[in-house]
Amino acid sequence: MTLRRNVSILIVDDHQIIRDGIKALLNRADGIHITAEAANGFEALEILEARHQDLDLVVMDIKMPEMDGIVATHQIREKFPDMKVLALTMHDDEAHIVKMLQEGAAGYVLKTTGKAELTEAIRRVAAGETYFDRQASEKILQFFYKGEKNNQKSHFIDTDLTSREVEVLKLIAEEYTNPEIAEKLFLSPRTIDTHRRNLLQKLHVKNTAGLVKYALKHHLV
């Protein structure tokens, strides 16, 4: 998706004071515009039904009445597959992080984050990348590592991945962004995008989490 000049955001949080705080934090952030807000997942879906073409990104809380962020994220990704979701929450436990990831969130940051990291997360996710803060990244890796230890399988790659695709897969699992991978491998970001899409197709996974899980299972990181 080609981004507009401004990243247009829907904020979803059941506390007005939190929504006001996010708006105040992002008010002077260049290229970011708060377009709409909702108090729960149900309201968010109603807004998206009417205005999804005007929005690039949903900044989603988790614990909310009527419809929580996990259910809302699942429904958003089903009904509006091009819509990006960034979780912004106080929950730093593995269960919430992994569940949001599994339901299609492309990023996860805690509400204790500062303006610089939040704006960076918004821009990356809106651009089609992923962004997980340090704590979330650690919990995701721990989750997949535990799954690997409990389910010992072949460590050999049994697909038709090229050596370049394996290289890109390793860097994705090591949390490099697409531009960083492009710079490291002396390739264009568009080429890295193509490699990422090919990896998703060849490995039969839906998102970055699936790529990371595959890389860990095959001891690429």
Image (cartoon, rainbow, N blue to C red):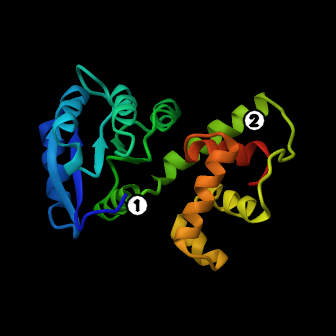
Q: Residue at x 23, y 48 (%)?
A: 53
Whichever of labels 1 and 2 marks the residue nearer the N terminus, that label is 1
Which residue is labeled 1 in the image?
124
Q: Residue furthest top?
A: 66
Task: Establish if 183 lies above or below 147.
Answer: below
- State left or right for residue 197 relative to residue 156: left
Image coordinates of residue 215 in percent, x first then y, are 72, 49
Which residue is labeled 2 in the image?
148
Task: Note whether residue 176 is visible.
Answer: no
Image coordinates of residue 52 in percent, x first then y, are 23, 43
- Viewer-side label of 1, 2: 1
Task: Establish if 80 lies above or below 184.
Answer: above
Kind of residue indicated by mark 1: Arg
Task: Note whether residue 185 is visible.
Answer: yes
Q: Residues within 10 Å of mark 2 (few under 14, many from 20)?
A: some
Residue nearer the viewer, 26 or 82: 82
Mark 1–mark 2 CB contact (< 8 Å): no
What's the CA distance linking mark 1 and mark 2?
Answer: 29 Å
Q: Residues within 10 Å of mark 1 (few under 14, many from 20)?
A: some
- State left or right for residue 109 relative to residue 58: right
Quadrant showing the N terminus:
bottom left
Q: Residue at x 63, y 60 (%)?
A: 195
Q: Residue at x 56, y 40 (%)?
A: 206
Residue nearer the viewer, 1 or 105: 1
- State left or right for residue 23 relative to residue 97: left
Image coordinates of residue 148 in percent, x first then y, are 75, 35
Image coordinates of residue 188 in percent, x first then y, are 56, 75
Q: SS for tag 2?
A: helix
